[in-house]
Image (cartoon, grey):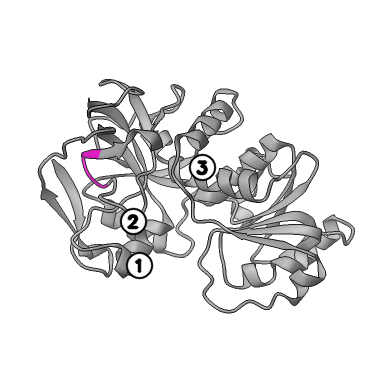
């Protein structure tokens, strides 16, 4: 099989396209012909060496799969050859999705929503699972509450806006003005141009000084450290970003705030919940660009570039067709 293998930590040039033996499913596993994957910030963080102790080299990386079951191992009852499936491979536990075939435990695999193409499905598994865990499991966002989604035009952010809207929350988001219409089409109620506006001032102005019930941080840095200033009493901050520096939590203490840090876990349940939203027309991933398996280095370079012009996700066509 063709695979893109990471041979050293560094820039996009650290990948090499090679031929490797096709994996064989063991007990409780399925072998999937990968039709599509996608690019996430986690992918370039792994590639540049942010987690060297967790990624033995050489390694096949990648964290999204949409494809078709080719073969099942002993004891597999949930799937049969020919089933269209989607999932996030176990993070830091075995080969990833930058290859034509992938083996996974049946418990993390879900049936692909019929209304999504493989490119769309592969653009949603990791970011969708992350947004679900952040908003539903950790923040316990409820109907009638308000939420600020930082980076609403990005991979996780554009899903979080739709999920918050489906829950029945009032959605604030920070995006560049060029992405206002995109964010509004996703269901955002209040748009904040982070290049021209102070998001804390904008939130307090729109809420009459109360603040929002939940802040969802997809950026880190000042975005995380200033989030308590935009919170209402008993508010919740949920972040999916590594804490790069110590945080001053005096403001959070004064708000009786709670903090949650999410490193998403893989399971079929979240995928099934997302599928239900998709089939009800309440959630749709946006594919902003498409590359081939061989061109993943170019996709990495683009996603890492500031103001890269990508709305939603960069998808990768791996198999015979990503459609």
Residue designated by label 1: 51
The answer to which of marks 2 and 3 sits earlier in the sequence is 2
User: Picture quarter containing residue 209?
Assistant: bottom right
Position of 244 relative to 300 (above/below): below
235 left or right of 87 in image = right
Name the one closer to the observer, 21 or 184.
Answer: 21
Q: Residue at x 71, y 61 (%)?
A: 258
User: Picture quarter containing residue 201?
Assistant: bottom right
Task: Rate crowding at label 3 as few (under 14), some (14 to 19) or many (20 or more) other CA atoms within 10 Å.
Answer: many
Query: What is the secondary structure assignment of the residue under circle 2?
Result: loop
Name the one closer to the observer, 244 or 170.
Answer: 244
Give the number of the mark in front: 2 or 3: 2
Q: CA distance from mark 2 to mark 3?
A: 19 Å
Residue 128: numbered disc: 3
The answer to which of marks 1 and 3 sits earlier in the sequence is 1
Q: Residue at x 26, y 47 (%)?
A: 98
Magenta region includes residue 84: no
Query: What is the secondary structure assignment of the residue under circle 1?
Result: loop
204 left or right of 83 in image = right
Residue 92: numbered disc: 2
Task: Rate crowding at label 2 as few (under 14), some (14 to 19) or many (20 or more) other CA atoms within 10 Å.
Answer: some
231 left or right of 80 in image = right
Magenta region includes residue 100: yes
Give coordinates of residue 294: x percent, y percent.
21, 49
Query: What is the secondary structure assignment of the residue under circle 3?
Result: helix
Give coordinates of residue 29: x percent, y percent.
27, 34
Give the number of the mark in front: 1 or 3: 1
Task: Rate crowding at label 1 as few (under 14), some (14 to 19) or many (20 or more) other CA atoms within 10 Å.
Answer: some
Name the one closer to the observer, 50 or 53.
Answer: 53
Counting every numbered tag in the picture gives: 3
Q: Which residues are magenta?
A: 98-102
Looking at the image, can residue 181 be seen? no
């Amino acid at each position: 099989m063709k695979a893109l293998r990471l041979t050293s930590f560094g820039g996009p040039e650290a990948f090499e396209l090679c031929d490797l033996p096709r994996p064989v499913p063991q007990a409780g596993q399925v072998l999937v012909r990968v039709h599509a994957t996608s690019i996430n910030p986690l992918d370039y963080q792994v590639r540049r060496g942010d987690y060297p102790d967790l990624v033995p080299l050489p390694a096949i990386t990648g964290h999204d799969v949409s494809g078709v079951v080719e073969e099942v191992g002993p004891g597999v009852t949930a799937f049969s050859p020919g089933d269209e499936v989607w999932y996030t491979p176990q993070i830091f536990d075995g080969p990833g999705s930058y290859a034509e075939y992938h083996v996974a435990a049946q418990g993390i695999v879900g049936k692909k929503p019929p209304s999504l193409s493989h490119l769309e499905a592969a653009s949603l598994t990791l970011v969708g699972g992350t947004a679900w865990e952040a908003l539903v499991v950790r923040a316990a966002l409820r109907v009638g509450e308000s939420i600020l989604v930082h980076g609403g035009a990005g991979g996780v952010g554009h899903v979080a806006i739709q999920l918050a809207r489906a829950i029945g929350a009032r959605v604030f988001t920070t995006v560049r003005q060029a992405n206002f219409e995109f964010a509004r089409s996703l269901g955002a109620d209040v748009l904040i141009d982070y290049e021209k506006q102070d998001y804390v001032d904008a939130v307090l102005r729109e809420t009459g000084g109360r603040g929002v019930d939940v802040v969802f941080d997809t950026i880190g840095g000042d975005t995380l450290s200033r989030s308590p200033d935009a919170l209402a009493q008993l508010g919740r901050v949920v972040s999916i970003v590594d804490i790069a520096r110590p945080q001053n939590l005096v403001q959070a203490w004064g708000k009786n705030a709670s903090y949650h840090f999410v490193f998403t876990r893989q399971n079929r349940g979240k995928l099934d919940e997302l599928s239900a939203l998709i089939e009800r027309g309440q959630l749709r991933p946006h594919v902003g660009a498409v590359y081939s398996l061989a061109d993943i280095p170019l996709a990495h370079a683009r996603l890492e570039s500031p103001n890269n012009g990508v709305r939603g996700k960069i998808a990768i066509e791996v198999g015979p067709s990503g459609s």
